[in-house]
Amino acid sequence: MGLTRRSFLNQVAQMGGYSAAFTTMDMLGLLPRAEASPLAGGLAPDTGKGKSVVILGAGIAGLVSAYELKKAGYTVTVLEARSRPGGRNWSIRKGTDVVFTDGTKQHCTWDEGHYLNAGPARLPSIHKTMLGYCKEIGVPLEVEVNVSRSALLQGNSLNGGKAVEQRQVIYDTRGYIAELLSKAIHKHALDSEIGIDDARMLLDFLSGYGDLDKASKYGGTQRAGFTVPRGAGDDPSKLHERLSLHELLVANFQKAEFYEDQIDWQATMFQPVGGMDRIPYAFAALLTQEIHYDCPITEIRKTANGVRIGYTHGGTPQQATADFCICTLPISVMQSVPNDFSAATQIAFKGMPMTSNYKIAWESERFWERENNIYGGISFLNQAVDLVWYPSDRFFSQKGVLLSGFNVMGDENGEPTEFGKLGDSLDTKLAASRYSVELLHPGHGRDLTKPIYVEWMKIPYSLGCYGNNHLAQSQPAYNQLIQPEGRLMLAGDYVSRLVGWQEGAALSAHRAVAHIASMTKG
């Protein structure tokens, strides 16, 4: 019996998780395409003359909205609950306090120049809107190394539990696949699927793909690296012994092997020099009169000719009025803010669950560079803390910030992940983080100092990382939330098809600005 589309996608999801299934659906044309920017040509400078807009939130969606509206001549007011711009675009560095909703407080004392991008940490080369803004507002960028073949993979069932280089897993796996497919062709098992000439060309391709010998056998490859490195003169070298195909399959490193294949994680990727928050601070420097900090929103109301926004500042109730309002507050926050959005939209605020992302970072000597030739990239493990992410800045310096732990606390069905099962103890979570570094780099778990733990569900004014708008159960809410309601409209990555990315937030802002411009002209 042939595979149905549903069963095929289910198998893809079981093997590679949501990201693999989402990419496959995208390739098959089963997802709506991401919207191009409706502001590609820009707005005339006098478009908004005599009109005002109040923007709730100074995250990327709010900042982009304010920037574009100001250029178009609108009077803009941005109300931000925090004392900084950026929202989830938050770089933690020396002097930063991380305060949770339960009162837990951490104070960062890292060396000057060190930082953790607690939210977004990468700018893909295909996200032209955000890259364009970085150029326009003067944010210097550098390459972010997303993948390194020198990074490590660890599974309890592979190599006695000792970590191996990523290049070994990648190229041994390729070699075995190439050999098996070559055998199938030689045995004419694919004659009904491929012609003689194509079979011959495919065999030639597989020989190069898997580095096979003349007999189409895989016996190891230089691509997988050396146990005794190459030298000069008569110095011998020795290749890594092949990893067993069975062990590779049992170890199930699909997350690591397919990580760089996701469309938004493909090289080349970038990061702002000095931290991702260089972007919101650059926007904020151009909006000094428009942004008002420490102004939590208390209500959102329609009026006969516009909107009225209630907020507090210094504990004192305040009001702002305008012709239009762009609300960029997280839907988790909107659930408790009295508002005049339609009943359907208020229901939709509760119809899209928030992701429970966390990050753990430490300051450390750069042993990974010195001993493993790892410069950027990510190591993966089959542990509660399943990845270790190496910094792409300040190579060859003495210390760096090592991220050991970046995932979600619970899956899409609300079931806790292995990390989520660790409970509420911060010490237990930090111990799991240190343990994963120790498994990858024996003896260096003790080198980790000054930990910082971020759990987005506990971050005030966020209450989660981003809206899970890709879930089937979220589609009715998504379809409702993307609809403007006259002079009220929403913006944020959760009302885009690039959820979790700054690009999605920026494009949603463009959509909201274009809607206001159309109403202004009307």
Image (spheres, rainbow, N blue to C red):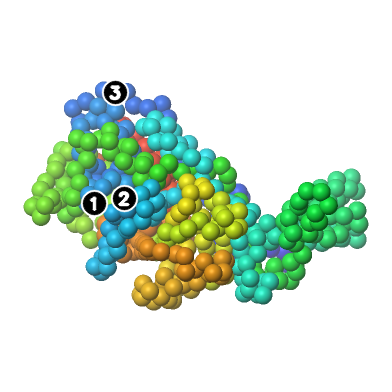
* Residue assigned mark 3: 45
| Disc 2 element | loop
Q: What's the distance in space between the residues labelled 2 and 3, CA to CA?
A: 28 Å
Q: What's the distance in space between the residues labelled 2 and 1, CA to CA?
A: 8 Å
Identified at 68% across, 71% down, the residue is 159
**Percent x, y of residue 147:** 58, 51
- Image quadrant for the C terminus? top left
The residue lying toward the viewer, choosing from 37 and 66, is 66
Q: Earlier in the sequence, mark 3 or mark 1?
A: 3
Farthest-out residue, left: 316
Total number of numbered discs in the rendering: 3
**Percent x, y of residue 261:** 61, 51
Identified at 41% across, 72% down, the residue is 429
The tag on residue 87 is 2
Q: Is residue 449 above or below residue 32?
A: below
| Disc 1 element | loop
* Residue assigned mark 1: 82
